[in-house]
Image (spheres, rainbow, N blue to C red):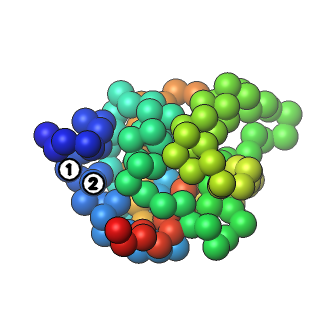
Amino acid sequence: MLKGISPLLSPELLATLSRMGHGDEIVLADAHFPGETVNRRVLRADGLKIASLLDAILPLFVLDPYVPDPVMMMAAVPGDTLDTQVLKSYREAIERHAPEVPPTVFIERFAFYERAKSAFAVVMTGETAKYGNIIIKKGVTPIG
């Protein structure tokens, strides 16, 4: 256990976040996401909700301010709907730590899978909300 670091962050996840460079992306995936299919680096965070993980990660992680889309979510399939509470809970966590971040960008389901293939890692969570997947892009961590 480390002082000042959320106990939700496993040693493996902390090491992964540390190894990421600016511009790298990490997927926080819901429990239904095909993580092992789309990416070779998969971490487990079973039982944890994504909003709670965002709250744990974002004090340690700068969202890239030089791109228009540092936060992306999977868009609902036509005819389906996204639970607005999912987006609300994620944005509350994001804005608590990075209020300057632009609105979340939504990308089509299969485009999201393609993006996840090139992500630095996929974190499989216990999130059960439909369309609960989110990608965050790391920025340059300031010194001091």
Q: Is mark 1 on a helix, strand or loop?
A: helix
Residue 3 lies, in percent from the top left, at 19, 42
Tell whether label 2 touches label 1 (CB within 8 Å). yes
Task: Name the residue at 54% across, 60% down.
Answer: 63
Q: Is residue 53 visible?
A: yes
According to the picture, the residue beneath numbered tag 1 turns out to be 11
Image quadrant assignment for residue 83: top right
Between residues 122 and 58, which one lies in front from this camera angle?
58
Badge 2 element: helix
Residue drawn at x 47%, y 42% is 54
Q: Where is residue 34 in the image (x, y as percent from the top left)?
A: 49, 47
Determine the residue positioned at 64% across, 73% down: 66
Residue labelled with disc 2: 14
Q: Residue 52 carries which label?
A: none
Front residue (pair 3, 113): 3
Q: How far across and how far down the image is residue 142, in percent?
A: 42, 70
Is disc 1 surrounded by few (<14), some (14 to 19) or many (20+) residues within 10 Å? few
Placement of the N terminus among the 4 image quadrants: top left
